[in-house]
Image: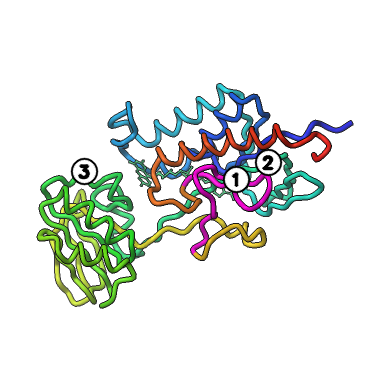
């Protein structure tokens, strides 16, 4: 007799996956999390300071991730280091082949692999990351109260970020490399009407300059724009390449799921930044993990042992 199939396999140990693990263990499920980074805790580990997680103002992102992970370990979640490469359903079970060839299986899967922020790939961007260069206005905008910020991008996230920052900063430069914005017309009109937003069209940023922190943006036509904070809002790429054959993603690659995490596939849930949603933050990722785990537990309870 082989070992009993674990109830739940979670892909990714960011805030969504770790919270899903905690809730699933408390629902008495057997849980395994597979994470590709050594003791990874997701994107939040890259944040120097998190000021919007309730109850823990000013906590370091690395420390917050460690606390999530420690909590999941204490609840009895088991962790496997490895990169999920292919997922499929066979004879009522979900299977996951890791890049190194190992195959894991479970009765249900919560996919919480997050996103990657697109980069400009220009000089200074990496050097001043976290020191004046940011990728999330909702996370770090408050550091620039009454100061000058620039938002780079032309889609919805850029225009929404500019509008958000306009309520905090003295002045916001919204810089787009083209004439036309991809963002919704209504938000663009709002941005155009804001007194403290200046829109620079057909402006290509070529370099970020600074000493200890970012101090100015250089444009391709050789203008130097002094700024205090720079928000690169040119989109995120959901890590869902391996789900292509499962057809659970929308046209932008995000898993199509509401806050229950349920998808069109039986026993397959999406949680965190990787699913369709409007606000990608630690708190919404954690909430997704909790919801998906509780719903998965409910669904598994209804599934007869014969099916697995
Ligand atoms: C610099 C920075 C600062 C931020 N600051 C804040 C802030 O102050 N406040 C806030 O609320 N939010 C902040 N955010 C956003 C926040 O980090 C994310 O919203 C949150 O981490 C999303 O959690 P998640 O679990 O959905 O995904 P992620 O955190 O992206 O975690 C996904 C995990 O899955 C793993 N993974 C991916 N693919 C695979 C695979 N194939 N196999 C195995 N593992 C895989 C990854 O290694 C990663 O550990 C910040 C983000 C960044 C980048």
Against 124, is 263 above or below? above
Name the residue: 63% across, 37% down: 296
Image quadrant assignment for residue 22: top right
Please provide percent x and percent y for residue 227: 15, 57
Q: Is residue 192 above or below residue 96?
A: below
Most frequent secondary structure within the magenta stretch? loop
Which label number is shown at residue 142?
3
Residue 81 sits in quarter: top right
Q: Are marks 3 and 1 in contact (CB under 8 Å)?
A: no
Q: Distance between the residues labelled 2 and 3?
A: 40 Å
- Which residue position holds label 1? 269
- 42 relative to 46 in the view: left or right: right
Q: Which of marks 2 and 1 is nearer the N terminus?
A: 2
- Position of 264 with respect to 202 (left or right) is right
Q: Do the residues labelled 2 and 1 touch (CB within 8 Å)?
A: yes
Per the rendered image, the range of residues in magenta is: 252-272
> For mark 2, what is the residue?
108
Residue 244: numbered disc:
none
4 part of magenta stretch = no
| Front of the two marks 2 and 3 | 2
């Amino acid at each position: 007799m082989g070992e009993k199939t674990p109830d739940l396999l979670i892909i990714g140990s960011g805030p969504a996956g770790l919270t899903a693990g905690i809730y699933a263990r408390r629902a008495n499920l057997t849980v395994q999390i597979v994470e590709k980074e050594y003791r990874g805790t997701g994107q939040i580990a890259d944040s120097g300071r998190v000021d919007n997680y309730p109850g823990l103002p000013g906590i370091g992102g690395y420390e917050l991730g460690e606390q999530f992970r420690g909590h999941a370990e204490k609840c009895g979640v088991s962790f496997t280091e490895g990169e999920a490469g292919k997922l499929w359903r066979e004879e009522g079970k979900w299977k996951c082949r890791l890049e190194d060839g190992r195959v894991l299986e479970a009765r249900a899967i919560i996919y919480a692999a997050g996103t990657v922020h697109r980069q400009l790939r220009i000089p200074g961007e990496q050097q001043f990351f976290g020191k004046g260069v940011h990728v999330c206005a909702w996370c770090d905008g408050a550091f620039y109260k009454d100061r000058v910020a620039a938002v780079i991008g032309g889609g919805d996230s850029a225009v929404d970020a500019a509008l958000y920052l306009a309520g905090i900063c003295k002045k916001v430069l919204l810089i787009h490399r083209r004439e036309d914005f991809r963002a919704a017309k209504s938000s663009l009109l709002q941005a155009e009407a804001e007194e403290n937003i200046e829109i620079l069209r057909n402006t290509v940023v070529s370099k970020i300059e600074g000493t200890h922190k970012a101090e100015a943006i250089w444009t391709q036509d050789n203008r130097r724009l002094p700024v205090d904070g720079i928000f690169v809002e040119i989109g995120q790429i959901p890590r869902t390449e391996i789900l292509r054959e499962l057809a659970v993603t929308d046209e932008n690659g995000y898993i199509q799921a509401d806050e229950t995490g349920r998808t069109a596939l039986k026993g397959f849930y999406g949680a965190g930044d990787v699913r369709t949603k409007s606000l990608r933050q630690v708190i919404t990722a954690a909430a997704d993990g909790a919801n998906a785990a509780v719903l998965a537990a409910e669904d598994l309870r209804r599934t007869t042992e014969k099916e697995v």
